[in-house]
Image: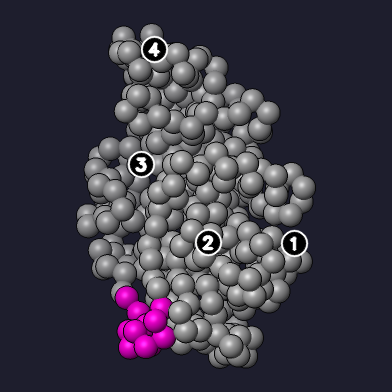
Amino acid sequence: MNLMNRQWLLARRPDGPLSNDNFEYRELELQVPQLQPGEILVQSLLFRCTPAMRTMMKANSQFMPPMTVGEPVVGSASARVIQSANPDYPVGCIVSALTGWQDYVVLDANKMPPVRKPDDVSLEDFEGILGGNSVTAYFGLLKIGEPQPGDTVVVSGAAGSTGSIAAQIARVKQHRVIGIAGGEEKCAWLRNECRLDAVIDYKSEDVEQRLGELCPDGVNVYFDNVGGATLDAVIENMAPFGRIALCGQISSYDEGNALAQGPKNMMRVIYWRLKLQGFLGFDYPDEMEHALSELRQWHSNGEIVTRLAIHDGFAELPTTYRRLFDGSHFGTLLLRNDQADT
């Protein structure tokens, strides 16, 4: 069985903001080998664009091994199993897996088991409310932030795929929630649809000053997607014994191979006895089923809303991905494979 496999390769490592020149399109004939026990052949249906992929394009990637120049861009997608040598993943089922930016790939499902889509869940919800970003928000807020009754929770990147879920979980848990986002459209969505208590527009407001006005008793929990100057501004307004869940540092992702900088005021971290902790969404495998159950329930009863930005066409992958960093996008950024029946 031979298939024409379209791919987007990492042509060169970005040094500064991404451009389409960092990527190269290739078509090649995929000669599908005889599958070994445990392997599956999948066709990519819906690509998920995440900021973490940008860090893996750097030679000094801290998250996972750096992407290889000349090889398909590393990224996740929902994909359909079209051949299987694994009884847990029969032909026709849909999984979320690290497929890379390509139409087809053979995966060893025993070595890295993909997540199967439940039959009664849409493809969009599988990548949205039940996707990896939502799980990251759930565990980061509740396990690392550990909000207590009466706490004030602040979320940066609050209109993003992860931040918007973290902020709404805090609201569902009856905490006071303040979101930080850029631009009136995003801020209006957070106020009106996500129903946050307050929103700060970092493009037109002084974040440190506004937090001081909104949080005279300090911030108890900060869910940080941004780092940089925003992290510094929040630290200046943290309450003693506050907790900071370090989820991402998107403000530094387009700075070539420079490493993200830490807080400027470490003495406040010490004297206020603040906890800063990084985490990953898959740190809690034994609690994953419960997390997904709660997320699904909150979404189905309208307590949590999602925003999906779905684009079309494999050829548009690089352009679509760059929307994560130019301010033109918010919510979960997805791209449909135009040659796959989704």
Q: What colour scheme has been applied to the protein in the rendered image?
A: one colour
Q: Which label lies toward us, 3 or 1?
A: 1
Q: Which residues are magenta?
A: 262-274
> Which comes before the other along the chain, label 3 or label 4?
3
The local secondary structure at tag 1 comes to loop
Give me the residue at 25% from left, 63% from top.
257
Q: In the rendered structure, which amino acid carries the disc numbered 4?
A: Ala
**Distance Cα–Cα, label 3 vs label 1:** 33 Å
- Residue denoted by label 4: 85
Question: Split into 4 quadrants, where in the image is the C terminus?
Answer: top right
- Residue denoted by label 3: 74
The local secondary structure at tag 3 comes to loop
Q: In the rendered structure, which amino acid carries the disc numbered 3?
A: Val
**Distance Cα–Cα, label 3 vs label 4:** 24 Å
Coordinates of residue 225 in the picture (x, y in percent): 47, 65
Give me the residue at 63% from left, 47% from top.
295
The reply to whether dot 3 and dot 4 touch (C-beta < 8 Å) is no
> Which comes before the other along the chain, label 3 or label 1?
3
**Distance Cα–Cα, label 1 vs label 4:** 45 Å
Give me the residue at 35% from left, 18% from top.
39
> Which comes before the other along the chain, label 3 or label 2?
3
| Residue 266 on the magenta segment | yes
